Amino acid sequence: MEKEYRPESVELKWHKIWDQNRLFQVEEDPGKEKYYLLEMFPYPSGNIHMGHVRNYAIGDVVARYKRMRGFNVLHPMGWDAFGMPAENAAIAHKVHPAEWTYQNIDTMRSQLKRLGFSYDWDRELATCAPEYYRWEQWLFVKMFEKGMVYRKKASVNWCETCQTVLANEQVEAGLCWRCSEVVLQKELPQWFFRITDYAEDLLEYCERLPGWPDKVVTMQRNWIGKSVGAEIHFPLENGDGHIPVFTTRQDTVFGATFMVMAPEHPLVMQLASGTGQEEEVRAFVERMWTQDKTKRTSDDYEKEGVFVGAYCINPFTKWQMPIYTANFALMEYGTGAVMAVPAHDQRDFEFARKYGLDIVVVIQPEGQTLEPETMTEAYVDEGILVRSEPFDGLENLKALEAIADYLEEKQMGKRAVNFRLRDWGISRQRYWGAPIPIVYCDKCGVVPVPENDLPVLLPEDAEMLEGGKSPLLTLESFVKTSCPKCGDTGASRETDTMDTFVESSWYFERYCSPGHGDGMFDQEAVGYWMPVDQYIGGIEHAILHLLYSRYFTRVLKDFGLVTYKEPFTRLLTQGMVCKETQKCPEHGFLYPEDVVEQGENGTCRECASPVEVGRIEKMSKSKRNVVDPNALIEQYGADTLRLFCLFAAPPERDLDWSDQGVEGAYRFLKRVWRLVEEHLADVTGVRPFDGDALPHGDLKTLHRKTHQTIKRVTNDIDARFHFNTAISAVMELVNTIQASKKEVLLSSEGAPVLRLALETVTILLSPIVPHLSQELWEALGNPESVLDVSWPTYSEEALAEDEILIVIQVNGKVRSRFSIAADADEEAIKAAALADDRVVERIADRPLRKVIVVQNKLVNIVV
RNA sequence: GCGAGAGUGGCGAAACUGGCAUACGCACUGGACUUAGGAUCCAGCUCCCCGUAAGGGAUUGGGGGUUCAAAUCCCCCCUCUCGCACCA
């Protein structure tokens, strides 16, 4: 063993040995309990960043720990390899996206290997490989046959910069989630997955995900957005059918005085034609169409609309209701038409006031009489129905039911449930994705590509076009094809590719049998490994990826391919890695090297303005506050980096980066190294303490600390995933060893206790800093890999204290403390407490009111 | 606006079921070893006040409550972060 800790040589040495012995490769073993640990796979963007390091360090601790607990652990890694950055880079650097992607994969794989993560690299996959995406195409065809996908011309979210359609989930506050450009609406034929068919089930199972953070479950529940209400039919005045309306407030239907339709509603122009309102309506609709949707739908935006020139009839009151089209009605929600009840809906109220429409109160709060003339806002709370014969006098909550019954009875409508969730639009007008396996034939129409013709290969000879327009559109060798049904040679291929979230919706199943050539996966392997026991990744995927994956799993179940509905039993969403930013008023965010003199007095190198520091933000290139893992690995080694990421904060919380903290982590590892190195000669050939009789005195204290540490670390890792406290527990043990007197440790009685303590430190740290632990383990003379050592256990006997420190409180304030034999009974403790000098002094001659004794902890004396 | 989470020393944080608040680390201060130290080791380190000292007082965003006992439970308020947001 070297005297100095030199991380690089230690780490590279063990990588080689682990690799040669194929220590991380696993197979199904029905005799062993499985544990599937999965971290969200990365997009191969170029280099591993600190967020990856944190994510995968957390995962690796759990994987290694579970393995030491005897589980058969599946811990795979792969690449979410399709996507737009590859294309954009390709355009910018004139390389093919495939080349760019595979190069990045090579770089990032070696970085992950350098960090010593225990992945079974034999299972590595990249979603851009035809042997991967062919099965996705296969499933698409199956779903097509079953009507689970459909094509529809739809108004879709369009990002001009990215030249593609975005799913609703990819629009954040009206901006593209990737480039933050304003999202426009565009009419295009699109492919959709019928995720809404599963809305109810996805929602219901939100209750059955106890291993998921509440936050994520709540977000999913809100996203699915179930509303229970009724659909009511409002007949058109001209007798030309009716307008269906969805409402959750059918109890207010007697107060519906007008109707509002979304500008996109197909009936709007139809109703307006020939009424004299046509021109005005057209102008309004067109203005809405081109208007930026965020603005139009933002909360503080003023409500506006126009009368379409037609009327419908309130089926309950028989009133004539003018029909308006207005900016606040949304085509995507409900039926795109709203019955407006101005007295009891704030939006309708504002609209009615603006356009002078009737306001009729139909719900009166108890002990109050609302008058439309004096109301300043809508009354939306509970009350009693009025002007609603035959429902007058009913509480409105009861009226909801009564009116729903009445609707169904009279066939004026029905009970209805509406979801906020939309079908998943998966068409992307980009090149670097899995082609949608569809052919369009003049005679046969839309024809799926037969199984035998799969995969539809993404052609590699495509030239990337400026502006990101898909080259597939004009690539004749791709587009021109023959119809699989009738053989007609004039057929053409679908040129859209699939949303990359489709690939990430089933990769975890593919890992179970990554080379499987006869289907999406080997069902037996999936039966053994799935579901994922622990999934770890960023909170940013709380809705998108996790909801899609839950949906996809249900589809697979309906095809009989899997037996479960929920793919991820437990979920851990780790926090972001953040760091202080430095900002110049002139030049914006600055790199640390562009700031003269760090800290409060920093100035900009360019313009010498004082630099604003202090805002801690998520590490990002644009904020110029990233820290490169590579540089740190080079300086301190992988173990230090891993240790810091785990020690600085509990996993679910954001981590504030601290260069000094990294230094501290390194210092600790050096101390551990030295500790073992210094005592190596003393414990060589000594067996770790396992005697029946416990050691005495100082040795007993150390021995107890060893067992306490095992208990704490085990609990922290296993039950709580609190690696930061696990590490501090080991630090305490190290401190205790160091503080123990040398002459005690080195007695013949002491050496085995010392050895046990040193080995315990080594083993407990091994999931966290595997290289260092492995090296120390070997130096201590243990031949086997630290990976396969069983996790240590503690004994209650060793934990037991001879004496217990009892705290004495007087009136709830700590006044004194004393030690007493651990087996002392309540009376003895009470007597000892009351006899304590300082207590006696405190109490003086005041009478005792009460004495509370908490066994093993404290005595509270109330006077 | 609705929903979720959080607020503890100079900083990251700990306190698991109500029972010694501030473990562990960072920064800082003093000392030792040293040609030197940015290496290492030892000691100190919540705040304020009174006191030479022993000791005492206050303190978990603010206010109130329950309790022998509250960072922890209940009520009101403030601040921050995240998600959704004209959802009929």
Image (cartoon, coloured by chain):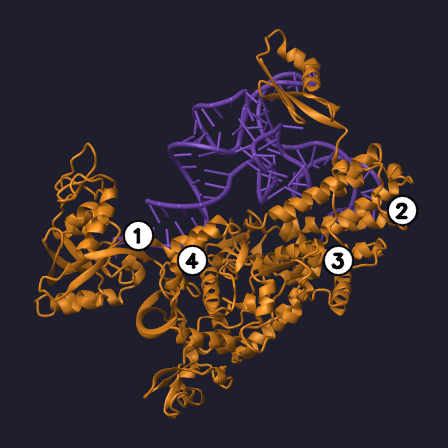
Question: Which element carries disc 4, helix, strand or loop?
Answer: helix
- The correct choice, above or below, for A857 with respect to B16 in the image is above
Q: Chain of mark 3?
A: A
- Work out whether disc 3 and disc 4 sit on a shared chain: yes
- Looking at the rendered structure, which numbered label has been put on residue A219? none
Residue depth check, mark 2 versus mark 3: number of the one nearer the observer: 3
Q: State the image coordinates of residue A316 (x, y, percent, origin top left).
A: 13, 52
Residue carrying label 2? A682
Residue carrying label 4? A202
User: How far is the residue under mark 2 from the one under mark 3?
Assistant: 25 Å
- The correct choice, above or below, for B32 with respect to A280 in the image is above
Residue carrying label 3? A788
Q: Quadrant of the C terminus of chain A?
A: top right
Q: Residues within 10 Å of mark 4 (few under 14, many from 20)?
A: many
Contact between labelled residues 1 and 3, with CB atoms less than 8 Å apart: no
Q: Amino acid at mark 4?
A: Leu
Q: Amino acid at mark 3?
A: Asp
User: How far is the residue under mark 3 from the one under mark 4?
Assistant: 40 Å
Number of marks drawn: 4
Question: Which element carries disc 3, helix, strand or loop?
Answer: helix
Residue depth check, mark 1 versus mark 2: number of the one nearer the observer: 1
User: What residue is at 84 percent from the left and 53 percent from the top?
Assistant: A780
Q: Colour of chain A?
A: orange
